[in-house]
Amino acid sequence: MDTQRPDGRARFAIFGSGRGSNAAALMAQFRKGSLDADLALVLSNVVDAPILNKARAHGYPAVLVENQGRSREDHEALCLACLREHHIDHLLLAGYMRILSPRFIERFKEQCGGVILNIHPSLLPDFPGLSAVAAQWQSGARVAGATVHFVDAGVDTGPCLLSGSIDVRGDEGAEGLAARILEEVEHVIYPRAVRLLLDRLRRGAALHGPQSRTQTSEVGTA
Ligand code: GRF
């Protein structure tokens, strides 16, 4: 399917590999019209990933580009072709369990011209990588949270756009904390981060760097 852009509005894609709760939170905001842009593609690398059904249920194009049985280069080339076909400007990673190669990031910039964002369940730069919530719980930290950041060639190392935090409850355990970070922080800050990005793009402001410090969003109550 080749999708034309009739009105010049920015077009987003979401990539995810699993349950897709962040994707669902984003879809709800795109659907409501509270983000001044269009969601034009939801792509997963995993057969039967719930994110694909969530996209279909919301009426968004859901595409499977399986990585199994393909080289990284072939898989990423197919993903780029799909992004091109849907005229995507910006990419939102939401539980996408693949590291994007530097080559993909470079070609995305050339082809799409936009940015790639990711959401991570910790207050970056603390606790990057896998098992971030368990590590936060085990560290005894009193405050935990999540961060939306620009994607670069490292793992959770790109400049931060927006973070949100909650107080850790002494008795909730790593699972309870993970559930609250997801619902009270991630689902709130990812749509806000997209709004912030669109606002900076519209104003021609710096997207990150010294002139645009990471913002912290007020979320939930402990
Ligand atoms: C979220 O915790 C996100 O921060 C991390 O992967 C998880 C994805 O969850 N990158 P979901 O698929 O959005 O429910």
Image (cartoon, rainbow, N blue to C red):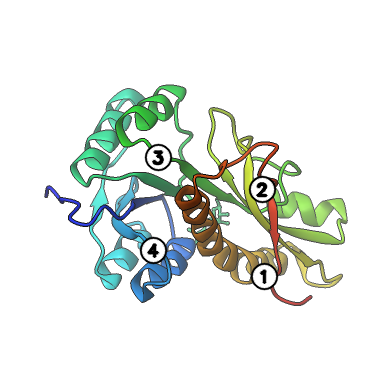
Query: Looking at the picture, which amino acid does disc 2 mark?
Result: Ser
Q: Label 1, label 3: how many angstroms apart (C-alpha)?
A: 31 Å
Q: Are marks 4 and 2 in contact (CB under 8 Å)?
A: no
Q: Quadrant of residue 144?
A: bottom right
Mark 3 residue crowding within 10 angstroms, few (<14) / some (14–19) / many (20+): some
Task: Give the secondary structure at mark 1.
Answer: helix
Q: Quadrant of residue 28?
A: bottom left
Query: Looking at the picture, which amino acid does disc 3 mark?
Result: Gly
- Please tell me which residue lies in front, 9 or 146: 9
- Please tell me which residue lies in front, 7 or 50: 7
Q: Which residue is mark 4?
A: 36
Query: Looking at the picture, which amino acid does disc 1 mark?
Result: Arg
Q: Label 1, label 2: how many angstroms apart (C-alpha)?
A: 15 Å
Task: Give the secondary structure at mark 3.
Answer: loop
Q: Which residue is mark 2?
A: 131
Examine the rendered structure and indicate whether residue 186 appears above or below residue 204: below
Q: Viewed as shown, does residue 3 lie left or right of 149?
A: left
Q: Residue 192, percent across and down?
A: 55, 63
Mark 2 residue crowding within 10 angstroms, few (<14) / some (14–19) / many (20+): few
**N-term mark: 1 or 3:** 3
Number of the label disc, if any, that sits on residue 114: 3
Quadrant where the C terminus is found in the figure: bottom right
Q: Residue 105, percent across and down?
A: 43, 29
Q: Are marks 1 and 2 in contact (CB under 8 Å)?
A: no
